[in-house]
């Protein structure tokens, strides 16, 4: 089902934060990739959890039973969101970074000096730092570089992956440049040498439908606050794999997946909220079951966001002194995330001036620091990033363009 400009206008009523005014004008939230706003249904689900349950797990009393049931249901919903086969393929944690560190520590215990891991220069540090840390144990970490347009070179993967490779860790979408790498080739190369593939879907999840089975990945991580939920990390581990990792956990904790990587008391309210976010997204799609509604909604929203971000990409590069970074908006998949630099201004200056007008965009490297370094932008303060989400409108993009034009004139 298409997601139209009228749908985007209509959905705004669901997001209380969008009512906030700044100098009498609505605040503009174009910081999508840095976190999305939450719809009322998600906020209510979190509130209801606290109002009705708020109990620790595995107790022999009603609120604990209900809490356990709600968390199990949330795992099922998140499994459907990712098209995982089983709810026990879904582990939950504080955030994506913490889950990745836990995975890396356990993975490192399986490896021997000389084994190799392949990462990319495009990735957020959360999918680099934990793997780079394993060099202390004699493990070689190889990096696939990026081209000037922010794409990964497929030939570079072919030359970095070898019989020694045990894991390829790669992003599904860059949070700095919007690049969506061609994963099929990466998975093929890795699986041909029996290496596992781990993907960071944090930036991909709010913008595209995810199907772990079609992607054929072994691990996938995402973070609910990027797809209209609260702060909670989600890990998909293909059935049978988590058992092979000596994850750190207390002896009183279950050794079975999905629990064996989960430590301490989880944020049950946030987990319930993450599932409510999936239900919210699905409410914009049609279909007989939750999965078909998720996919239908995600496709429609992706098209809407792509068109809006594409219009901004074309227009902003016409402004004198503005350079756009990242791949072009064409028929290949690309996240609706546009990063620019403006001659004569640091990224922070631009973001601050826009912020004074109530236009909220992010500046810097957004922890995708390697990409910013490789593009030679670190000394200039990095990038000014505009992240389009389902509730962003054409008139917001006009406001942004107008402000940038004035800024460029003043340079
Ligand atoms: C692409 C990407 N990967 C990983 C992360 C880290 O996620 P978390 O904050 O849940 O650890 C982020 C957060 O900005 C991100 O954008």
Image (tube, grey):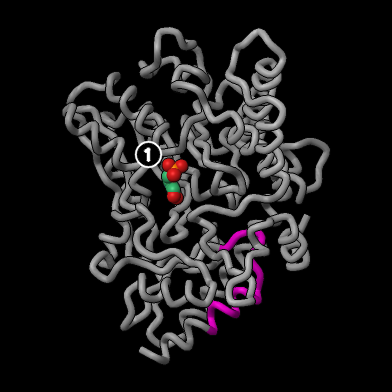
x then y, percent, for residue 25: 63, 76
388, 276: nearer the viewer: 276
Image-based side of 5 in relation to 351, left or right: right
Q: Quadrant of residue 22?
A: bottom right
Q: Is residue 327 visible?
A: no
Left or right of 354, for residue 106: left
Which residue is painted at 63% across and 65% down in the image?
20
* Residue 66, position as x, y percentages in the image: 70, 20
On screen, residue 72 versus residue 180, left or right, reads right
Horizontal and vertical percent for residue 18? Answer: 65, 62
**Residue 49: horizontal and vertical position, in percent?**
68, 31
Residue drawn 43% across the image and 54% down it: 174
Point 76% across, 51% down: residue: 284
Answer few, some or many: residues within 10 Å of disc 1's Cα (few below 14, many 20 plus, some between 14 and 19): many
Q: Nearer the viewer, residue 198 or 345?
A: 345
- Magenta region: 388-402
Name the residue tied to disc 1.
169
Q: Quadrant of residue 76?
A: top right
């Amino acid at each position: 089902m298409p997601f139209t400009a009228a749908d985007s206008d209509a959905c705004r009523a669901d997001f209380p934060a969008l009512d906030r005014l700044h100098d009498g004008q609505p605040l503009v939230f174009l910081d999508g990739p840095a976190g999305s706003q939450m719809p009322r249904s998600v906020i209510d689900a979190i509130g209801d959890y606290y109002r009705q349950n708020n109990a620790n797990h595995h107790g022999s009393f009603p609120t604990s039973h209900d809490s356990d049931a709600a968390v199990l249901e949330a795992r099922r919903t998140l499994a459907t969101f990712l098209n995982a086969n089983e709810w026990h393929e879904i582990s939950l944690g504080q955030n994506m970074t913490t889950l990745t560190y836990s995975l890396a520590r356990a993975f490192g215990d399986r490896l021997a000096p000389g084994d190799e891991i392949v990462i990319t220069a495009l990735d957020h540090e959360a999918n680099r730092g934990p793997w780079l840390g394993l060099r202390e144990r004699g493990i070689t970490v190889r990096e696939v570089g990026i081209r000037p347009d922010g794409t990964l070179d497929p030939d570079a993967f072919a030359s970095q992956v070898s019989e020694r490779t045990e894991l390829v860790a790669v992003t599904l979408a860059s949070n700095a440049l919007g690049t969506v790498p061609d994963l099929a080739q990466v998975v093929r190369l890795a699986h041909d040498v029996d290496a596992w593939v781990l993907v960071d879907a944090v930036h991909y999840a709010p913008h595209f439908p995810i199907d772990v089975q079609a992607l054929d990945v072994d691990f996938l991580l995402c973070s609910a606050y990027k797809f209209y939920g609260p702060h909670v990390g989600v890990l998909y581990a293909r059935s049978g794999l988590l058992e092979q990792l000596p994850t750190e956990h207390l002896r009183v904790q279950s050794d079975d997946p999905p629990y064996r990587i989960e430590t301490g008391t989880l944020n049950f309210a946030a987990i319930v909220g993450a599932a409510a976010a999936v239900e919210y997204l699905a409410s914009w799609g049609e279909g007989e079951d939750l999965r078909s509604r998720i996919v239908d909604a995600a496709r429609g929203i992706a098209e809407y966001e792509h068109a809006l971000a594409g219009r901004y990409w074309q227009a902003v590069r016409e402004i004198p002194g503005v350079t756009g970074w990242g791949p072009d908006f064409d028929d290949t998949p690309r996240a609706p995330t546009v990063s620019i630099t403006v001659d004569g201004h640091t990224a922070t200056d631009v973001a601050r001036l826009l912020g004074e007008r109530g236009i909220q965009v992010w500046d810097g490297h957004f922890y995708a620091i390697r990409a910013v370094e490789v593009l030679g932008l670190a000394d200039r303060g990095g990038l000014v990033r505009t992240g389009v989400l389902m509730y962003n409108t054409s008139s917001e993009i006009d406001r942004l363009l107008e402000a940038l034009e004035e800024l460029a004139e003043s340079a």
